[in-house]
Amino acid sequence: MKKIFFSFLMFAAMLTPVVLTSCGDDDNDNGTDPTDDNKLSGSIQDTRTLDASVEYLLTGPLIVEDGATLNIPAGTTIKAQKGFGSYILVLQGGKINVNGTAEAPVTMTANIENAEQGHWGGLIINGRAPLSGGETGKTEINNAYTYGGTNAADNSGSISYLILAYTGARSSADVEHNGLTLNGVGNGTKIENIYIPDGADDGIEFFGGSVNVKNLLVVNSDDDMFDMTQGYNGTLENAYGIWEPGFVSSEEDPRGVEADGNLDGNSPNQTGQSDFTIRNMTIDLRLQPSTTEGYFMHAVLKIRRGAKATIENALVKGQGQARDLVDMTDGKGVGNPASVISITNALSTPLMNTVDDGIKGVANITTDNNNTGCPTDIFAWTGYQF
């Protein structure tokens, strides 16, 4: 996880609102938008519904404004041009409804064949649910776009059966998008059945909020598979993370789960630190064993900086290498010792840290051979071959 803020001016040219060139049907149609143009960018200020028969091209930032709604029907495909400025952002008070089905998921991907990680930005949602310390957050790409508030039940829409591929574009080595970024998103938002393959930085990152996510498959995320920070207090249920054979991470400390109680560990005394649940999780490391940086996972679970985790039925397996099984330590503060973690280590390669079964720090940690992790049949709709 990396969180560096930028001034508005730095991206002003990139983010200047423009007229949305096409969004299919318009419930408030004023007749000004061409219907034969498949390009998406700019500002949505009303209710727009895309057309599943059109293949859309995302040419720049697509911003769903406060009070606006973007509806994306089953089977819709959006292909993004390469670059840090290609992303979809739902502002506080805006809504996105991704109405995919198992038979016809919605796909957001690169606009070229043989794309690589970090081709485009991904999907960002800003909500009004609480953050640690009751703070207001500022979106990484633009300080003017805030998130966080007092409404844990805030509703930013509904997302079902969505593929987010080749996300995580970066503007520098320290500033990257994720696949799905949830900033202060409330539990009135429905998010389930998500597939995030081949993304740079994190597969999913929760910056505070209380949103629950169910049935999430992340494959070949460059950094962390599942990342929580800034007071996140929701539940992630049925999470499966995979590193495939031949995968190499470019990050300094890739992990299965990385959890901070507060933002970057800079506010250890804040109230409302992260207190979340993960239920039914598998981390599957299919790489050849290696102790070379980029070829092993630093920690399967990294819980730090005041975060409290309840992790039930977790399983790590495969032949790949991992340094630590559970690491509760950190220079900016340890993880909450009241954390309760049940994890089964089924790796065929021994952990690099052989002390105390690869566990650092204090928590209520159970290691046994009984956990089954996340089921795979729930991801049949993705076509992924387990």
Image (spheres, rainbow, N blue to C red):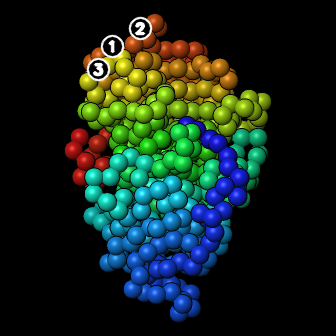
Residue named by callout 2: 354
As shown in the figure, which amino acid type bears the numbered disc 3? Pro
Number of marks present in the image shown = 3
Q: Secondary structure at mark 2?
A: loop
Q: Quadrant of residue 127?
A: bottom right
Q: Secondary structure at mark 3?
A: loop
* 52 lies left or right of 232: left
Q: Which mark is residue 289?
A: 3
The residues bearing labels 3 and 2 have C-alpha atoms spaced at a distance of 15 Å
* 258 lies left or right of 147: left
As shown in the figure, which amino acid type bears the numbered disc 2? Thr
Residue named by callout 1: 350
Please state which of residues 354 and 32 is positioned toward the viewer in this rendering.
Answer: 32
Residue 103 showing in the rendered view: yes
Counting from the top left corner in percent of width and height, residue 72 is at 43, 71
Give the quadrant of the N terminus: top right
Which one is closest to the eye, mark 3 or mark 2? 3
* 104 lies left or right of 293: left
Query: Upstream in the sequence, badge 1 or badge 3?
Result: 3
Counting from the top left corner in percent of width and height, residue 333 is at 67, 22
